[in-house]
Image (tube, rainbow, N blue to C red):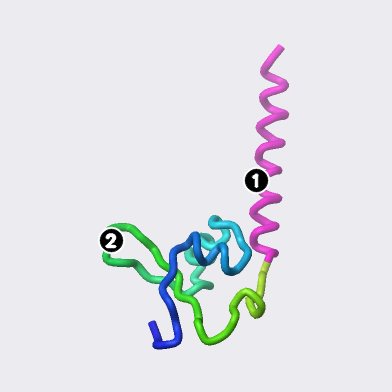
Amino acid sequence: MTEDEQRITVQEAAHRLGFKEDAIRKRIQRGTLKHGKGPEEGRVYAYMNTTRDTSQNATYDGSQDAAEDASYFALVRCFTIKLSTCVA
């Protein structure tokens, strides 16, 4: 962490960037958001630059989220079709 960065919770990062918490967690998993673990067991923090307004300059790559949403809905639709053929 550099001197112009602030350690914040996933919830706070989501609020500041205007994303859902799950989107922040996915970015942490993909390594596209700087992060680290705190002294508490299992707590993950995001590092945000405090010298500029990150909510105005954040780049949003919605393609990954959109692909995940499409995959989820396709899977739900598949299960729905399978269930409807099983129930008579």
Q: Amino acid at mark 1?
A: Tyr
Q: Position of residue 78 (x, y in %)?
A: 69, 35
Residue at 50%, 82% (x, y): give it. Answer: 50
1 or 2: mark nearer the eye: 2
Q: Which quadrant of the structure image shows residue 27?
A: bottom right
Question: Could you tell me which residue is drawn at 44 percent across and 64 percent down?
Answer: 9
Q: CA distance from mark 1 to mark 2?
A: 33 Å
Residue at 66% of width from left, 40% of height from top?
Answer: 75
**SS label for mark 1:** helix
* N-term mark: 1 or 2: 2
Q: Mark 1 — residue? A: 72
Circles 1 and 2, Cβ within 8 Å, touching? The answer is no
The local secondary structure at tag 2 comes to loop
The boundaries of the magenta stretch are: 62-88
How many discs appear?
A: 2
Magenta region, mostly helix, strand or loop?
helix
- In this orientation, which residue lies closer to the viewer: 38 or 69? 38
43 displayed left or right of 79: left
- Label 1: few (<14), some or many (≥20) within 10 Å? few
Residue 58 % position (x, y): 63, 76
Q: Quadrant of the C terminus?
A: top right
Q: Quadrant of the N terminus?
A: bottom left
Q: Position of residue 54 (x, y in %)?
A: 59, 78
From the image, tell me which residue sits under label 2. 40
Given the image, on which type of amino acid does mark 2 rest? Glu
